[in-house]
Image (tube, helix red, strand yellow):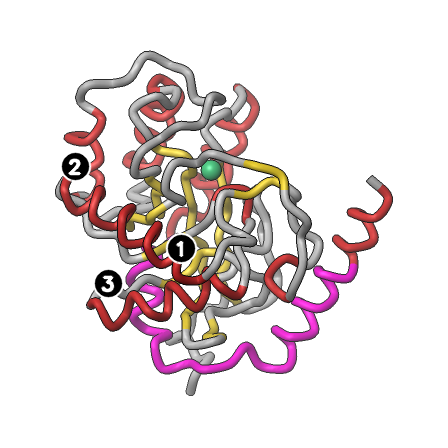
Amino acid sequence: MKWQRKGKKVEYCIRLDDACPQMNAEKWARIERILDKYKVRPIVGVIPENRDPDFVAVADENFWEKACEWQKKGWTIALHGLHHELHFHEPRGYYQLSHSSKTEWAGKSSTEQYEMLKQGYQILKGHGLTPTCFFAPCHTYDEATVEAIASMKTEECSMYISDGYALHPYQRDGVDFLPTLFDTPHKLPLQGVYTFVYPNNMQEQDFAYLEDFLKKYASLFRSADEIMGEYSLMKEQGILGKIIEHSIYFLRGIKGSKE
Ligand SMILES: [Zn+2]
């Protein structure tokens, strides 16, 4: 029951990261045109109050209006950190296995992270956006982040996390996860839900590749919110999901130790 998908074997989501007034608006408009053309509704990760020096374009005064238009089009709005301001940390614990040493969230107490979540959530609400999803900059979050996200439910600010490794959405530590196995779109043979991730620095060949992929497989893409609505009863990854998760952590851990 849990995994049956009404005849569909594979479903895809697309995630656009780092939306903020200082992003590369030209590249963003280009990917938006492609997604609209193929009627694909992505998850868009909005930074509530950007302070990342990597995003240096002149601030777009119409950014928040555009973000509200995305929401109206049925795009899934995600809270992407708070300031996207990164510092170095020592990755540790289950959610940090093999992950980046740069973070905005990991290592802080759950109380502090809860306050950050609330602040970020309120900033987006103030701009007319209702986030249903959260993902941390650089994929770096920890047990305290998950605990804080779980606590947000009691404030009626439920969000699932777009991260983790598995073939299907699952629940862990009281929070729903929509896994992200690959960044670049792939045709995948195993039944599952796959999220492909695009940062805001796409190159010419990336646009061509994406359009080519959508030409063939646009019908398999769905909105993350719709998918997560259907998976809300699912409580576990299943054995195959766990094997995949542990294998990826193991392989990335080896890669990480060589770097
Ligand atoms: Zn980011």
Identify residue type, mark 2: Glu
The answer to which of 191 and 76 lies nearer the viewer is 76
Looking at the image, is mark 1 or mark 2 nearer the viewer? 1
The residue singled out by tag 1 in the image is 112
- Which element is circle 2 on? helix
How packed mark 2 is, by other alpha carbons closer than 10 Å (few <14, some 14-19, many 20 or more), is: few
Residue 6 position by quadrant? bottom left
Inter-mark Cα distance, 1 to 2: 32 Å
The residue singled out by tag 2 in the image is 69
Q: Quadrant of the C terminus?
A: top right
- Which element is circle 1 on? helix
Which stretch is magenta? 221-250
Whichever of callouts 3 and 1 sits on the residue coming sooner in the sequence is 1
The answer to which of 121 and 44 lies nearer the viewer is 121
Residue 233 is one of the magenta-drawn residues: yes
Q: Residue furthest bottom?
A: 1
Residue 255 is one of the magenta-drawn residues: no
Inter-mark Cα distance, 2 to 3: 21 Å
How packed mark 1 is, by other alpha carbons closer than 10 Å (few <14, some 14-19, many 20 or more), is: some
Identify residue type, mark 1: Glu
Q: Would residue 62 appear left or right of 231 to someone viewing this image? A: left
Inter-mark Cα distance, 3 to 1: 17 Å
The residue singled out by tag 3 in the image is 157
Which residue does the image show at 35% across and 65% down from the upper left?
227
How packed mark 3 is, by other alpha carbons closer than 10 Å (few <14, some 14-19, many 20 or more), is: some
Which residue does the image show at 61% across and 73% down from the upper left?
241
Q: Position of residue 231 (x, y in %)?
A: 37, 74
